[in-house]
């Protein structure tokens, strides 16, 4: 039976790593729809976990979610993350419901994962492995596939170091002395070689990307990147503004690559607009690193359009998660306009709100319904061509107030 990367990450088998390294992408799918139990723990004073996002992630990866469990602990148990009483309770659920896969909404250590799998009698995945698996499933371009495989191998190799060091003790002893390698060393070496080869290939791809970016820089257009939490509606907005037809779907991480298009705003005013990978809470560090080049479009932008799903009750936390990732990739200094999308779902009329400098810094709109898009375009134009917007401001002054003495510099 074939093993998927997710399965391998769940119950790592030494010796299978070579084939995993060769074709991690091609097998990046659950063979069926495993019956799944989701587990989250409210730790200390942290807010009660909301399992709806984990459920969406699990379903994106092909899981069939049958049961959910939320419990409370002061801190994670070092051996199994949850206490032995809870483990017993979950084991019973697994038996009764014929559960095949248990997914934790946390990062588990290799030891915790192994112990849990043994006690629960089924595969156990953590949140990081699940996100990596979805990325593997979605990666479509050569670059995307290389990036995901690199992130998966780095996740795996960190576990080899931490989780399987006990195997090194098998070295030495009667009949085992002398030359030869432990399985652990072999696997480490294989992963190391593969990681090196992937990095080399990615470097080439990145050089090409950098050349393309330099070419775009020469054309002096305003560079604008759409960023935001996954599923916020970034690609829908991109399509509305560019008519590009990139995939926009009700699924997490529908977009993994960066697409750029030149967009006309006003006579003589163009922007190069880019749509890229979405962010998520606790985005695995290895993924952020592997996708750094894709995300560089964001760092080098003149302006970020931060799309926020106004209808999502978690939107506040999502905005914070986006800001954290922007900081991690070194893009927190890039000016931002907040775009509150999906206003059709919350019954809010489209509008723009000026920031301290007088330019529109927040927009409420609906990408899908095409409402408020003119305000989004105006906000970008005001940012890119401030003098032009001062002219507009003067025109917008009440008619009976007479000519407004505007010193253009005072408005900047
Ligand atoms: N009701 C409503 N739905 C919207 C709106 N904008 C986008 N959507 C829906 O939200 C879902 C996600 O849209 P995408 O544009 O793919 O979101 P994204 O941010 O690009 O997502 P990822 O690429 O997965 O990170 C799709 O089902 C869209 O139809 C909107 O204004 N109103
Ligand atoms: Mg998208």
Image (spheres, rainbow, N blue to C red):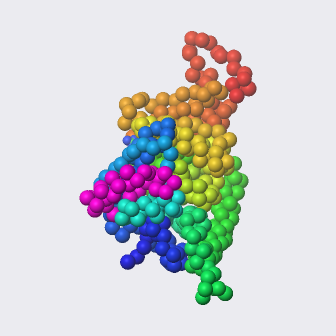
Residue 172, percent from left and from top: 63, 81
Nearer to us in this view, 108 or 33:
108
Residue 279, percent from left and from top: 53, 49
| Residue range (magenta) | 77-106
- Which residue appears farthest toward the front when viewing the image? 174
Nearer to us in this view, 148 or 275:
148
Query: At x 60% / y 11%, what residue is drawn?
Result: 401
Query: At x 55% / y 40%, what residue is drawn?
Result: 320
- Which quarter of the image is occupied by the N terminus? bottom left
Nearer to us in this view, 233 or 404:
233
Residue 368 visible somewhere in the drawing: no
Residue 384 visible somewhere in the drawing: yes
Q: Is residue 13 above or below residue 320?
A: below
Q: Is residue 342 left or right of residue 265?
A: left
Q: Is residue 124 left or right of residue 322?
A: left
Residue 304, percent from left and from top: 60, 43
Residue 58, percent from left and from top: 39, 56
Query: At x 68% / y 60%, what residue is drawn?
Result: 210
Residue 243 belongs to magenta span: no
Across the whole image, how many numbered discs are drawn on residues? 0
Query: At x 41% / y 63%, what residue is drawn?
Result: 117
Q: Is residue 201 left or right of residue 407?
A: left
Instruction: Determine the image quadrant of residue 180.
Output: bottom right
Q: Is residue 337 above or below residue 235?
A: above
Q: Is residue 249 left or right of residue 178?
A: left
């Amino acid at each position: 039976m074939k093993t998927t990367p997710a399965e391998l990450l769940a119950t790592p088998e030494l010796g299978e790593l070579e084939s995993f390294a060769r074709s991690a992408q091609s097998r990046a799918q659950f063979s069926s729809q495993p019956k799944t139990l989701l587990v989250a723990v409210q730790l200390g004073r942290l807010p009660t976990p909301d399992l709806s996002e984990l459920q969406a992630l699990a379903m994106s990866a092909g899981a069939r979610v049958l049961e959910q469990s939320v419990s409370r602990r002061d801190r994670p148990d070092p051996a199994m993350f949850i206490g032995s009483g809870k483990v017993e309770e979950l084991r019973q659920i697994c038996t009764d419901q014929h559960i095949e896969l248990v997914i934790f909404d946390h990062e588990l250590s290799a030891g915790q994962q192994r112990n849990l799998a043994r006690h629960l009698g089924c595969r156990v995945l953590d949140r990081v492995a699940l996100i990596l698996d979805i990325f593997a499933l979605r990666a479509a371009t050569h670059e995307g596939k290389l990036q995901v495989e690199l992130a998966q191998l780095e996740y795996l190799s960190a576990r080899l170091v931490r989780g399987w060091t006990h195997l090194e003790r098998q070295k030495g002893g009667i009949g085992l002395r002398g030359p030869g390698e432990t399985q652990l060393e072999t696997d480490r070496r294989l992963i190391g070689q593969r990681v090196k080869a992937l990095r080399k290939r990615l470097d080439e791809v990145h050089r090409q990307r950098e050349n393309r970016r330099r070419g775009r820089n020469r054309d002096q257009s305003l560079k604008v990147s759409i960023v935001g939490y996954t599923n916020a509606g970034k690609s829908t907005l991109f399509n509305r503004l560019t008519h590009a037809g990139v995939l926009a779907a009700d699924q997490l991480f529908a977009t993994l690559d960066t697409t750029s298009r030149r967009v006309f705003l006003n006579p003589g005013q163009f922007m190069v607009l880019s749509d890229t990978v979405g962010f998520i809470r606790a985005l695995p560090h290895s993924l952020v690193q592997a996708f750094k080049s894709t995300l560089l479009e964001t760092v080098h932008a003149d302006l970020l359009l931060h799309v926020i799903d106004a209808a999502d009750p978690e939107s506040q936390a999502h905005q914070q998660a986006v800001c954290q990732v922007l900081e991690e990739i070194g893009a927190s200094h890039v000016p931002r306009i907040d775009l509150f999308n999906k206003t059709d779902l919350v019954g809010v009329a489209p509008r723009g709100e000026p920031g301290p400098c007088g330019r529109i810094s927040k927009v409420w709109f609906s990408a899908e319904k095409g409402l408020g898009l003119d305000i989004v375009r105006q906000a970008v134009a005001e940012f890119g061509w401030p003098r032009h917007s001062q002219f507009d401001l003067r025109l917008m002054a009440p008619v009976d107030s007479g000519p407004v003495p505007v010193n253009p510099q005072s408005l900047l």
